[in-house]
């Protein structure tokens, strides 16, 4: 085996160290967003809501009190049901979940303009799209830090308290949980991308917050009117999207099947929406530079 490995071409790591083309600045900007965000008070406020509150509520939740059976099957079902409910109630509810996402992302561009650091940033050999993508990916990194702890804790606490078999039950549906977290992040990325876009348009943090909340309120109002009208498909509701997508992911006691073409097409659309919003943000950032 060692002889075969010796014959394989070596990876030239110097290429990556010396690479000076497009995209080189994206991870640098993203890393700066993460490091600066976790030092701010608003991050800890969001952590209380996204992490501490779900964990504390789960600690006082008497799991299994009204459940006659236990074991891997019932544990997986209730664990995945709890994760879905947590997604809907905490992470994307309009009450605080979406508002905190807006607050976390509102000054990514507007804050740079207000403090004058955007002008300094423009003097560097950097593309506008690198700025937008770096800010976006850094923000999503911060949100991932907030999402993962409580959801993983909730999922595995149900498995433990309902006597799921170790390690098969814990690892057998791990792909479903990972996929569910990806869907959650994609839904949240729509809010983040919209906020970044609006912050490039208004260039003031307060205006970015207010305009983003107004846009979310309008979407929520239209969504509610669609429900009242009895519409079967409500693509403007994050909760409806979760209910539509998650059954294709959850409740499979075997590893998730690959032949979910419709599901992956749906996820492709969720990727396309923030991509379009970020493209608009790049256009407005370039226009601001020209002005």
Image: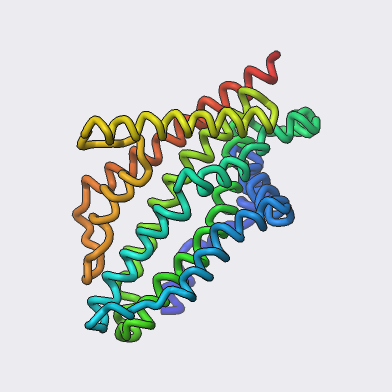
Q: Is residue 139 above or below residue 156?
A: above
Question: If the image is split into quadrants, where does the C terminus sit?
Answer: top right
> x%, y% of residue 171?
34, 76
Residue 192 shown left or right of residue 25 in the figure: left
Residue at image point 21% right, 34% down = 230
Residue 221 shown left or right of residue 212 in the figure: left
> x%, y% of residue 40?
73, 52
> x%, y% of residue 44?
67, 58
Residue 200 shown left or right of residue 235 in the figure: right
Residue at image point 46% right, 34% down = 275
Residue 175 shown left or right of residue 142 in the figure: left
Task: Compare residues 78 and 291 and report the one nearer the observer.
Answer: 78
Task: Residue 64: name its quadrant.
Answer: bottom left
Q: How is the image coloured?
A: rainbow
How many dots with numbers?
Answer: 0
Q: Is residue 279 above or below residue 47?
A: above
Residue at image point 61% right, 60% down = 48
> x%, y% of residue 216?
48, 34
Task: Compare residues 199 and 217 and report the one nearer the observer.
Answer: 217
Q: Is residue 258 above or below residue 263?
A: below
Q: Is residue 58 something one can see in this rendering?
A: yes
Residue at image point 50% right, 45% down = 95
Q: Is residue 182 something one can see in this rendering?
A: no
Question: If the image is split into quadrants, where does the N terminus sit?
Answer: bottom left
Q: Is residue 232 above or below residue 146?
A: above
């Amino acid at each position: 085996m060692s002889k075969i490995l010796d014959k394989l071409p070596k990876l030239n790591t110097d290429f990556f160290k010396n690479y000076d083309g497009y995209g080189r600045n994206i991870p640098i900007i993203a890393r700066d967003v993460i490091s600066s965000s976790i030092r701010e008070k608003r991050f800890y406020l969001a952590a209380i809501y996204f992490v501490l509150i779900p964990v504390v509520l789960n600690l006082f939740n008497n799991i299994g009190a009204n459940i006659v059976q236990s074991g891997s099957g019932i544990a997986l079902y209730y664990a995945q049901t709890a994760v879905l409910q947590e997604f809907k109630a905490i992470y994307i509810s309009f009450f605080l979940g979406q508002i905190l996402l807006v607050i976390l992302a509102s000054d990514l561009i507007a804050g740079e303009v207000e403090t004058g650091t955007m002008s300094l940033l423009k003097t560097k050999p950097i593309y506008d799209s690198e700025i937008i993508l770096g800010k976006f990916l850094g923000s999503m990194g911060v949100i991932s830090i907030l999402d993962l702890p409580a959801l993983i804790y909730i999922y595995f606490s149900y498995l433990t308290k309902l006597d799921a078999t170790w390690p098969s039950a814990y690892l057998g549906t791990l792909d479903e949980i990972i996929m569910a977290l990806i869907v959650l992040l994609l839904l949240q990325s729509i809010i983040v991308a919209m906020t970044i876009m609006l912050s490039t348009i208004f260039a003031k943090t307060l205006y970015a917050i207010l305009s983003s909340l107004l846009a979310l309120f309008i979407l929520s109002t239209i969504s509610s009117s669609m429900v009242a009208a009895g519409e079967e498909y409500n693509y403007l509701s994050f909760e409806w999207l979760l209910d539509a997508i998650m059954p294709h992911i959850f409740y499979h006691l075997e590893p998730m099947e690959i032949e979910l073409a419709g599901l992956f097409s749906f996820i492709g659309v969720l990727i396309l929406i923030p991509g379009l919003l970020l493209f608009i943000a790049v256009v407005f950032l370039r226009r601001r530079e020209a002005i």
